[in-house]
Image (spheres, rainbow, N blue to C red):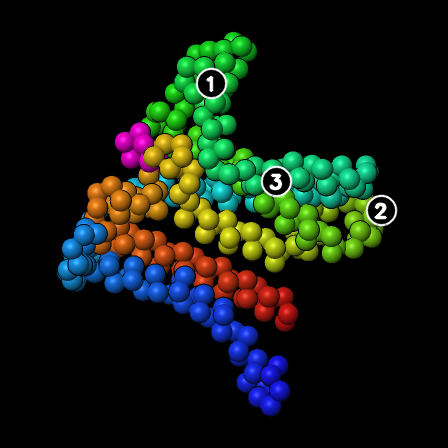
Amino acid sequence: MIKGQGRAGYWLYLVPGAILLTVIIIVPLGWNVYLSFTKYRGIKPPEWNGLENWKELFHDAEFWASFQHSIVMVVAMVVLPTVFGLILASLLFDLVGRRFDGKIAGLLRAVYYLPQILPIAIAAIVVGWILRPEDGALNDLLDAVGLGGLQHNWLGSPDTALLSIGAVMVWIQIGYPVVVFMSALQRIDPQLYEAAELDGANWFQRFRAITLAGIRPEIFVVVLTCTVAALKVFGPVYALTRGGPGTSTTVPSYYSYTEFFTAQRVGYGATIATALTVVVLAVAIFFVRAQFRLVDEEAR
């Protein structure tokens, strides 16, 4: 604190962060919202057109279809990783960590987290090798085990492209909840598990009564951050399918990108991005309020 300035001196430490927040977040967001009310192709100055972009958005079937694809992304990046992450973290902590060396549990945790640190371009190359229609590893494996009739153009067919990207996202995403949940489990007293085991509780009963109750705040954090990531997902779609075949894997962020840079309809692309921002904010507020309500109920 600067001498002689009292508690007001503390506010000086917030200035760098406030400047960065303004330059990186607030100004671009305000500019994007403004563009959503304009007709702008990126060359001539924006022309104000009121609510025309928003009217078009509400009647745009491709936009609503992209949000339906986001539901698949939410299942692939939130529901499945959270459920499997909970089970895996509990198994590693409660069974592997206690009955074997703790280093083995740590090694397995690192293995699960490895896809998270892979650049999306590298992950896309690996997945491309696996899912290629002619000589991909998955089709070769199916042929080798006598299931050649199931060979498919996994990323090139509209019926399987989105599900294939979803499967990839489960693989990439699952390490994050495992790491968060295992860190949260460190603060639970191991004697609780031992006491429950002595009382005859099986693994599932210990998981429900001790693990779930003990790491509930972290579950909220994982679900919130993963949901936001799923709604904004862009990289895997861009790297693997570019929204195709057709529009079968287009998600809102990629649709906004194509309107910005391919169709050169910057105003309409900004409208899609603004709508996506509103949805993300609504989801974040919902989860935060739900967590606060749960904490209040537990405190009573």
**Left or right of 203 in this view: 243:** left
Mark 2 burial class by Cα count in 10 Å: few <14, some 14-19, many 20+: few
Q: Residue at x 50, y 45 (%)?
A: 78
Q: CA distance from mark 2 to mark 3?
A: 33 Å
What's the mark number on residue 68? none
Which one is earlier in the sequence, the residue at label 2 or at label 3?
3
Q: Position of residue 299 (x, y in %)?
A: 64, 70
Three-letter amino acid code at disc 1? Gly
Dot 2 and dot 3 residues touching (CB under 8 Å): no
Q: Are marks 3 and 1 in contact (CB under 8 Å)?
A: no
Residue furthest to the right in view is: 198
Residue at numbered disc 3: 113
* Residue 88 percent coordinates (x, y): 65, 39
What residue is shown at x 44% (from left), y 69% (from top)?
19
* Position of 49 relative to 240 (above/below): below
- Establish if 136 lies above or below 255: above
Displayed quadrant of residue 294: bottom right
Q: CA distance from mark 2 to mark 1?
A: 50 Å
Q: Please name which of the two marks, 2 or 1, marks the residue nearer to the observer.
A: 1
What are the residue bounds of the magenta stretch? 243-249
Tell me which label, 3 or 1, sits earlier in the chain: 3
- Of residues 214 and 231, which is closer to you in this image? 231
For the question of whether residue 83 can be seen, the reply is no
Mark 3 element type: helix
- Within 10 Å of disc 1 (Cα), the crowding (few <14, some 14-19, many 20+) is some
Three-letter amino acid code at the position of disc 3: Tyr
Q: Which residue is mark 1?
A: 136
Q: Which residue is mark 2?
A: 198
Residue at horizontal 36 percent and vertical 40 percent from the top = 69
Which is more toward the observer, 204 or 140? Answer: 140
